[in-house]
Image (tube, helix red, strand yellow):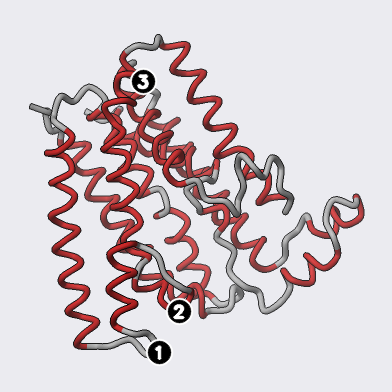
């Protein structure tokens, strides 16, 4: 039986609040011009809260890498809330039918988690359960790997995954290029391997009892969140490196023109493959781990 610790329960509660905050301010960020104070407040909340999902996955790895619970039982725990959400959401769409979208399309998009642009609201919420379910199904094999490699091999595996799945997409986002597009890209979302990487990192923190000073881990979280906000703001409004990169021939002039259209919102530094989100998530988890 897994021992429940209050500090990690508190972290889960905070992560839940973060998820609610993301979905509360998301609409306001999309419609408010970046120069407005409303946008800036919402963007701050958005930047801090995007560590929530990585926290959930790392906690899963933290506690589950040595779990002996059968996969079928873990799957049932996900299927039940999925069915409950599906039924409630379908009932909602029947009472308040979406404009321009057939109820049949809503049903199909909820079951198979795909859809068109205009129906994205009606399928996007399910991606997390699907990816988490895949991680749970694969967890016995991941756990076997974790148990049979030493600390150095575990660390090197994490470094390799972070470089391919986090560092390269972040470089792509900053310089608006596609380095190693086939393997990793800010456009190509490899959510399953990204989630597996978070799982493996969480297991590493648990297996080797990684602890750093609270003020250091909190600083990592805060600096990461501040950088996420700053980069998201500047890339949404100014893109400060654009002119410099155009002079160097790294970026085409049309890209700058595109960035200046209407001051749109850029959330590429808040994606789960963002190196900054990874660092912020690790900092927050390690901060709570160090608590008594």
Position in image of residue 216 (x %, y %): 45, 30
Residue 85: which quarter of the image? bottom left
Q: Is mark 1 on a helix, strand or loop?
A: loop
Reading the image, the residue beneath label 2 is 118
- Compared with 195, 70 (above or below) is above
Drawn side of residue 259 relative to residue 136, left or right = right
Q: Residue 14's x, y, as percent?
A: 27, 50
The CA distance from mark 1 to mark 2 is 8 Å
Disc 3 to disc 2, how far (Cα)?
45 Å
Quadrant of the snapshot with the C terminus: top left
Q: Which residue does the image show at 47% across and 61% down from the upper left?
A: 44
User: Residue at (48%, 25%) from the top-left corner?
Assistant: 158
Location of mark 3 (residue) = 210
The residue that appears at 16% across and 57% down in the rendered structure is: 81
Image: 48 above or below 62: below
Q: In this orientation, which residue lies closer to the viewer: 113 or 220? A: 113
The front one of 255 and 245 is 255
Check contact, mark 1 vs mark 2: CB within 8 A: yes
Is disc 2 placed on a helix, strand or loop?
helix
Residue in view at x 67 percent, y 68 percent: 237
Closer mark to the observer between disc 1 and disc 3 = 1
The answer to whether the residues at label 3 and label 2 have Cβ atoms under 8 Å apart is no
Looking at the rendered image, the disc whose residue lies closer to the viewer, 3 or 2, is 2
Q: Which residue in the protein does label 1 denote?
A: 100
Q: Distance between the residues labelled 1 and 3?
A: 52 Å
Whichever of labels 3 and 2 marks the residue nearer the N terminus, that label is: 2
Which is nearer the eye, 122 or 34?
Answer: 122
């Amino acid at each position: 039986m897994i021992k429940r610790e209050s500090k990690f329960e508190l972290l889960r509660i905070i992560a839940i609040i973060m998820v609610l905050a993301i979905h509360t301010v998301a609409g306001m960020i999309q419609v408010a011009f970046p120069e407005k104070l409303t946008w800036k407040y919402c963007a701050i909340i958005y930047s801090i809260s995007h560590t929530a999902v990585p926290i959930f996955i790392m906690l899963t790895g933290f506690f589950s890498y040595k779990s002996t619970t059968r996969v079928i039982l873990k799957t049932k725990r996900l299927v039940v809330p999925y069915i409950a959400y599906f039924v409630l959401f379908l009932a909602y769409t029947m009472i308040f039918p979406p404009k321009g979208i057939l109820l049949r399309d809503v049903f199909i998009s909820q079951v198979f988690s795909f859809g068109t642009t205009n129906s994205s609201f009606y399928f996007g919420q399910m991606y997390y359960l699907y990816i988490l379910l895949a991680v749970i199904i694969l967890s016995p094999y991941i756990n076997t790997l974790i148990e049979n490699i030493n600390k150095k091999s575990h660390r090197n595996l994490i470094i390799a995954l972070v470089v391919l799945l986090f560092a390269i997409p972040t470089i792509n986002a900053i310089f608006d290029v596609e380095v190693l597009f086939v393997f990793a890209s800010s456009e190509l979302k490899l959510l399953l391997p990204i989630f597996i990487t978070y799982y493996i990192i969480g297991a590493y923190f648990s297996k080797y009892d990684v602890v750093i000073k609270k003020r250091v881990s909190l600083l990592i979280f805060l600096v990461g969140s501040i950088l996420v906000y700053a980069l998201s703001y500047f890339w949404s409004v100014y893109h400060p490196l654009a002119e410099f990169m155009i002079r160097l021939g790294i970026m085409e002039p049309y890209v700058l023109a595109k960035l200046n259209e209407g001051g749109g919102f850029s959330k590429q530094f808040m994606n789960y493959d963002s190196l900054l989100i990874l660092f912020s998530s690790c900092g927050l988890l390690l901060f709570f781990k160090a608590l008594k």
